[in-house]
Amino acid sequence: MSSTTQQPKIDFQDVTRVYEVNKSEFYAVNGVNLAVADGEFITIVGPSGCGKSTLLNLAAGLDDPSAGQVLVDGLAVKGPGPDRGVIFQQYALFPWLTVRKNVEFGLKVAKVSATERRHRAQEVIELVGLTDFAESLPKTLSGGMKQRCAIARAYAANPNLLLMDEPFGALDALTRVRMQEQLLETWSKQRRTVLFITHDVDESVYLANRVVVMAARPGRIKEVIEVPLPYPRTEETRLSPAFVEIRNRVWHAVYHQE
């Protein structure tokens, strides 16, 4: 999927973010340029301290660049907005609310009518496979179910862009694989542009149209690697020679830092 044939959904233009640490300047990211097409699934992978989460926070409007700009649909990001759904590693669910009420919460804040809230919540609860648990409290759910609830809550607001920061990082290996499959199934049904942060090389390749490999000190894009594997992706995809070749290329780029 090309990111140059039309206006990008999200566009990092020479983005730099500098923090002051012990009276010295620390470049979290420096001179990042990245254009992401509408409907594209981008994963960002790299070592700790390379600025992955910084880029996501800048796109979410949770932080501001020191130089350059981040555009969404051609407009500069100025703080958070309902057009961008953010999903973190920690589920941040309200423990006293059921799955349905958690999913409806953002819609209620936005003053969406009760009828419309329930309709939209039901749609996304079905989409992520939690219909049988709609009236359950978070404490009764597994880690994977909690993250599916968080994804449903983000989808319910109907964002154009999903920003996901290590959403499966706290899950066991088997649940993580199942969540990757569930996410791609959800994405295929309601296509959103996705920016997905991960430390896991296999995960980065399995999910993405393109993998952005970052290097640290300063945080910068080292390489962008195309993943021309067809969707839907399955267990057989992970075992294919093409997948192994791309994974090895990404692995080499991540772990052989300049």
Image: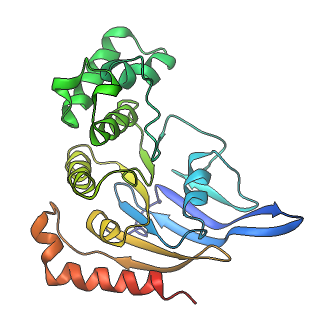
- Out of 236 and 38, give the one closest to the viewer: 236
Q: Position of residue 26 (x, y in %)?
A: 77, 68
Q: Position of residue 241 (x, y in %)?
A: 15, 84
Give the image's coloring scheme. Answer: rainbow
Extreme residue in the left direction: 236
Q: Residue at x 20, y 44 (%)?
A: 189
Relative to residue 165, is residue 246 drawn left or right? left
For the N terminus, the quadrant is bottom left
Q: Residue at x 63, y 73 (%)?
A: 219
Q: Is residue 50 above or below residue 93?
A: below
Number of callouts: 0
Extreme residue in the top direction: 114
For the C terminus, the quadrant is bottom right
Q: Residue at x 19, y 82 (%)?
A: 242
Q: Position of residue 7 (x, y in %)?
A: 47, 59
The image quarter containing residue 113 is: top left
Q: Position of residue 197 (x, y in %)?
A: 45, 60
Q: Is residue 194 above or below residue 47?
A: above
Q: Is residue 66 above or below residue 179?
A: below
- Out of 254 and 231, give the one closest to the viewer: 254
